[in-house]
Amino acid sequence: QVGEVESLTKAFADASACFEDDEALTSMPAEAFAKATEAATAAEAVASTKLAEARKYLGERQAEAKGRDGCTEIAIELAKYSARIAAAVGEVAKRKRLVTSAGDRLQAKRSMEEMREKVVAFEAKVDEAVEKAVKASEVEESGDIH
């Protein structure tokens, strides 16, 4: 079961890899983003279900091992499996946060791009206004001299 959980966790990691790079995410078409989100969400659901089953099974085996005398070898093996499952749980949680935050990160990136464009346009208008003011000032000064 632990090996299966690890392979499902890797499959989820592979499905969610496209959400790691914000630049690539920004250039991703909306349809591709939706499909990637759907695939990653499905992979996460499968991995989470198997993780829950594996944790339950492992907990039962650990409870059985505690009831037996002289089963330190079994307890050690169960502890190793528990550590592997905990690592998988951590990876799934990290990847789930990555996928669920992708929409917000994408929207924030797009908002920043829009604001950057507005700032550039505003700076151009300010430059134009300053240039007009300088010309008007020069005309006014030249009128005072003559």
Image: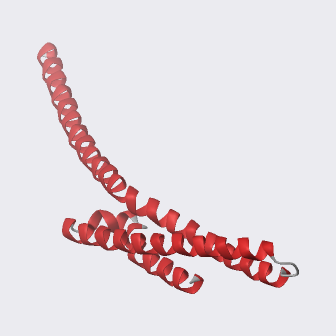
Give residue 117's position: percent from left, percent from top: 24, 47
Q: Nearer the viewer, residue 62 or 30?
A: 62
Q: Is residue 49 above or below residue 10?
A: above
The quarter of the picture where residue 58 lies is bottom right
Q: Quadrant of the N terminus?
A: bottom right
Q: Nearer the viewer, residue 121 or 21?
A: 21
Q: Is residue 124 above or below residue 26?
A: above
In-image side of 12 versus 1 (left or right): left
The quarter of the picture where residue 21 lies is bottom left
Q: Is residue 109 above or below residue 115?
A: below
In-image side of 137 versus 1 (left or right): left
Q: Nearer the viewer, residue 93 or 60?
A: 60
Q: Nearer the viewer, residue 106 or 6?
A: 6
In-image side of 108 versus 9 (left or right): left
Inspect this view and state whether residue 13 appears: yes
- Residue furthest to the top in view is 144
Give residue 74's position: percent from left, percent from top: 78, 83
Q: Residue at x 54, y 69 (%)?
A: 91
Give residue 104's position: percent from left, percent from top: 34, 52
The quarter of the picture where residue 45 lies is bottom left
Please name the colour scheme applied to the rendered image.
secondary structure
Q: Quadrant of the C terminus?
A: top left
